[in-house]
Image (spheres, helix red, strand yellow):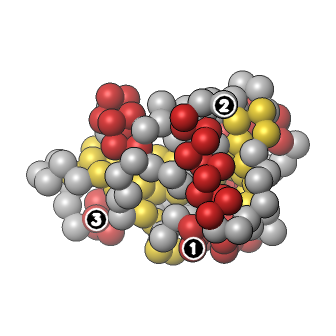
């Protein structure tokens, strides 16, 4: 088991949540993950990392698989202009490679917001630290575990 996968499993275990991690096969995109999990596209949690243009502070946005983040709304929440973080910065801050960024278990926690669309489901699926592994969780539990604030930041 990879270090990344172990970190996510530990977070779930420490929160007394069931270990629902499984190898889904290629799940690098929301579309592939939805096919692998047999769920609706919007039940896939995309973990999108942005970086503050002035501060360099990392921000995490958890959004439904079919939604796109509105840069202006995301920047307003962050209080500064945001840009997408590059792969090296994502790995350095989260410990995960792009395509496998879990919403929990980051090396360095960052301010986090969650898409209200995810709250419409009893269960959602998120990357578990690799592009091939996912886990399922109730969205309310995810919001608490990720210390995320509910906010409108999608187009």
Q: Position of residue 151 (x, y in %)?
A: 47, 72
Q: Quadrant of residue 73?
A: bottom left
Up the image or down, 67 lies above or below 77; here it is above
Q: Which residue is mark 2?
A: 1
Choose mark 3 or mark 2, whichever is in front: 2
23 sits left or right of 65 in the view: right
- Name the residue tied to disc 1: 144
- The picture places residue 125, in percent across and down from the top left corner, at 72, 51
Q: Toward the viewer: 65 or 37?
A: 37
Residue 77 relative to residue 48: left or right: left
Callout 2 environment at 10 Å: few (<14), some (14 to 19), or many (20+)? Answer: few
Residue in view at x 35 percent, y 52 percent:
108
Mark 3 or mark 2, earlier in chain: 2
The residue labelled by disc 3 is 78
Disc 3 vs disc 2: Cβ atoms closer than 8 Å?
Answer: no
Q: Where's the N terminus, which quadrant?
A: top right
Asked whether, in this view, residue 137 is left or right of residue 8, the answer is right
Of helix, strand and loop, which one carries label 1? Answer: helix
Classify residue 120 as left or right of residue 98: right
């Amino acid at each position: 088991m990879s270090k990344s996968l172990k970190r996510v499993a530990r977070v779930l275990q420490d929160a007394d949540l069931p270990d629902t991690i499984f190898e889904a096969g290629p799940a690098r995109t929301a579309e592939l993950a939805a096919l692998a999990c047999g769920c609706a596209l919007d039940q896939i949690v995309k973990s999108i990392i942005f970086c503050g243009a002035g501060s360099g502070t990392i921000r995490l946005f958890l959004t439904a698989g079919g939604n796109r983040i509105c840069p202006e709304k995301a920047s307003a929440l962050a209080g500064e202009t945001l840009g997408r973080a590059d792969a090296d910065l994502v790995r350095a801050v989260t410990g995960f490679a792009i395509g496998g960024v879990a919403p929990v278990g980051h090396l360095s926690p960052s301010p986090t917001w969650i898409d209200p669309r995810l709250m419409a489901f009893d269960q959602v699926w998120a990357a578990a630290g690799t592009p091939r592994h996912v886990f399922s969780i109730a969205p309310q539990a995810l919001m608490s575990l990720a210390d995320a604030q509910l906010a409108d930041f999608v187009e």
